[in-house]
Image (cartoon, rainbow, N blue to C red):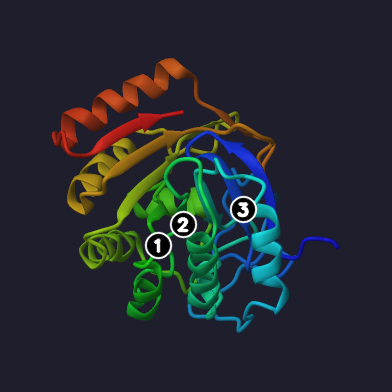
């Protein structure tokens, strides 16, 4: 039977061996149209207030159990992929079933984390934060910390909140989930176009560090492009530049409790 919700398992740079769960329609559903997106452009950018009601079908539990019993060494069950998963109002229904299935199975080591990817655009909503806070690990996107960089890098829907509200939303989420882990993900890239300023600019990098210092996440994950991006004129920064950014972050954040990694 074709899989309806799951993909993988696959080896993730940041999560180890991960099984993906996609709870959105097969067409990409996202509030952003990021220049670097590795699953292609967003054909119709969605407002952050838009919601779909797509509860798990009767097949979800069986599909999950049938796969997980063959990977007792899995490290993450990861919600994300085809857009912004918090747009689905039934996110917690999927989470509850996943939690049940995880409890029922035997694991070689620790049970896998139940992880959520989010681009952070919907976290201003208390209802969304109430759903998100249940996950063991939330990977929250923050590629930009200035309004100009947010607009040029993430190309948000016109209803998306400004960068100050995005950062404040992440501060609130951190406080809402004291016993869970929050990771801030920053994808840094470069551009071949002389008329396009990438998010690898001095102001954005420094403001990202100050925003992270304010948010106080458990982990910062810095990375660059590893697959074909949405726009042909976007390319990855190199390891030397990544190390320079890590150095800047550490100098500004100055908090040994925040783990800073690059990939």
Label 2 sits on a secondary structure element that is strand
- What is the crowding at mark 2: few (fewer than 14 residues within 10 Å), some, or many (at least 20)? many
The answer to which of 195 and 90 lies nearer the viewer is: 90
User: What is the number of the mark on residue 93?
Assistant: none
Disc 3 target residue: 20
In the rendered structure, which disc, 2 or 1, sits on the residue that comes first in sequence? 2
- What is the crowding at mark 1: few (fewer than 14 residues within 10 Å), some, or many (at least 20)? many
Residue 48, position in %: x, y?
49, 74
In the rendered structure, which disc, 1 or 3, sits on the residue that comes first in sequence? 3
Residue depicted at 78% across the width and 61% down the height: 3
Q: Is residue 93 above or below residue 160?
A: below
Q: Is residue 223 above or below residue 101?
A: above
Disc 1 target residue: 135
| Quadrant hosting residue 225 | top right
Circle 3/circle 2 CB separation < 8 Å: no
Circle 2/circle 1 CB separation < 8 Å: yes
Residue 157 shows in the view: no
- What is the crowding at mark 3: few (fewer than 14 residues within 10 Å), some, or many (at least 20)? many
Label 3 sits on a secondary structure element that is strand
The residue at the far top in this view is 240
Q: Is residue 224 above or below residue 104?
A: above
For the residues labelled 3 and 2, the Cα–Cα distance comes to 10 Å
Disc 2 target residue: 114
For the residues labelled 1 and 3, the Cα–Cα distance comes to 14 Å
Residue depicted at 42% across the width and 48% down the height: 149
The answer to which of 8 and 121 lies nearer the viewer is: 8
Q: Quadrant of the N terminus?
A: bottom right
Residue 260, position in %: x, y?
30, 33
Circle 1/circle 3 CB separation < 8 Å: no
Residue 22, position in %: x, y?
64, 62
In the image, taking residue 149 as reference, residue 205 lies left or right, namely left
Residue 167, position in %: x, y?
29, 58
């Amino acid at each position: 039977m074709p899989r309806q919700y799951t993909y993988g398992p696959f080896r993730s740079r940041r999560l180890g061996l991960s099984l993906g769960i996609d709870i959105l329609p097969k067409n990409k559903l996202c509030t952003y149209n990021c220049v670097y997106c590795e699953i292609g452009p967003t054909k119709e950018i969605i407002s952050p207030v838009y919601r779909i009601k797509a509860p798990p079908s009767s097949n979800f539990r069986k599909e999950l159990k049938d796969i997980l019993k063959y990977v007792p060494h899995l490290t993450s069950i990861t919600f994300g992929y085809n857009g912004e998963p918090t747009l689905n109002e039934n996110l917690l229904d999927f989470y509850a079933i996943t939690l049940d299935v995880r409890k029922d199975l035997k694991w070689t080591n620790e049970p896998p984390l139940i992880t959520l990817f989010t681009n952070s655009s919907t976290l201003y909503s208390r209802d969304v934060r109430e759903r998100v806070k249940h996950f063991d690990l939330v990977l929250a996107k923050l590629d930009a910390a200035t309004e100009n960089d947010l607009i040029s890098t993430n190309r948000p829907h016109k209803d998306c909140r400004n960068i100050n509200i995005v950062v404040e939303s992440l501060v609130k989420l951190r406080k809402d989930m004291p016993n869970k882990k929050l990771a801030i993900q920053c994808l840094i890239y470069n551009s071949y176009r002389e008329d396009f300023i990438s998010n690898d600019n001095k102001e954005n990098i420094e403001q990202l560090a100050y925003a992270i210092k304010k948010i106080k996440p458990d982990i910062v994950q810095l990375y660059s492009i590893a697959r074909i991006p949405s726009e042909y004129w976007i390319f990855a920064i190199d390891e030397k530049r990544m190390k320079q950014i890590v150095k800047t972050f550490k100098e500004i954040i100055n908090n040994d409790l925040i783990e800073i990694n690059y990939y």
